[in-house]
Image (cartoon, rainbow, N blue to C red):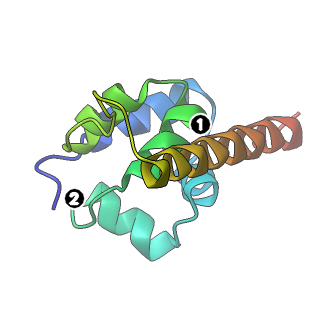
Amino acid sequence: MALFFDAGWFSKRLAALNLQKEDLARAVGWTQEELAWVFKDQKEVSAREVAALAALLHASPGEIANRCGISTPVAAKPVSSEAQIDQLQNRVAALEAQVAALEVALRSR
């Protein structure tokens, strides 16, 4: 379980980017219930979700991990093939989040 989810920071960041919590949930792939659990600090955020949040909110994965109350999901030493696959999957998730954010921006015009 996360030690502390900084709901205020996330709410302010969403507002600064003209996004809603629903946009965040859609970009990460959370249900409304999961979104509520995260904001109530009752659901831990995964490394894949950190990457997607970082892309959507234009923040570093380290900043997002810190605001989610978890350790930074960044490997410090060479990684195995499996870890490289995980990193690529995280990157794809981040790109998908960026596309979702762009779609939201286009719809709001």
Inter-mark Cα distance, 1 to 2: 20 Å
- The amino acid on which the numbered mark 1 sits, given as a three-letter code, is Leu
- The amino acid on which the numbered mark 2 sits, given as a three-letter code, is Asp
* Labels 1 and 2: the sequence-earlier one: 2
Residue under the image location 21 percent in, 58 percent down:
41
Q: Is residue 109 left or right of residue 69?
A: right
Residue 22 locus on image (x, y percent): 58, 57
Foreground of the two, 75 or 65: 75
Quadrant holding the C terminus: top right
Q: Disc 1 vs disc 2: Cβ atoms closer than 8 Å?
A: no
Residue 2 locus on image (x, y percent): 17, 54
Res. 49 in view: no
Q: Which residue is tagged 1?
A: 56
Q: Name the secondary structure under disc 2.
A: loop
Res. 92 in view: yes
User: Few, some or many C-alpha atoms within 10 Å of disc 2 (few <14, some 14-19, many ≥20)?
Assistant: some
The mark found on residue 44 in the picture is: none
Residue under the image location 33 percent in, 55 percent down:
45
Which circle, 1 or 2, is nearer the viewer?
1
Foreground of the two, 21 or 28: 28
Residue 92 locus on image (x, y percent): 66, 46
Q: Is residue 21 left or right of residue 77?
A: right
Q: Name the secondary structure under disc 1.
A: helix
The mark found on residue 41 in the picture is: 2
Quadrant holding the N terminus: bottom left
Residue under the image location 24 percent in, 61 percent down:
40
User: Few, some or many C-alpha atoms within 10 Å of disc 1 (few <14, some 14-19, many ≥20)?
Assistant: many
Residue under the image location 49 percent in, 49 percent down:
81
Residue lying furthest left = 3
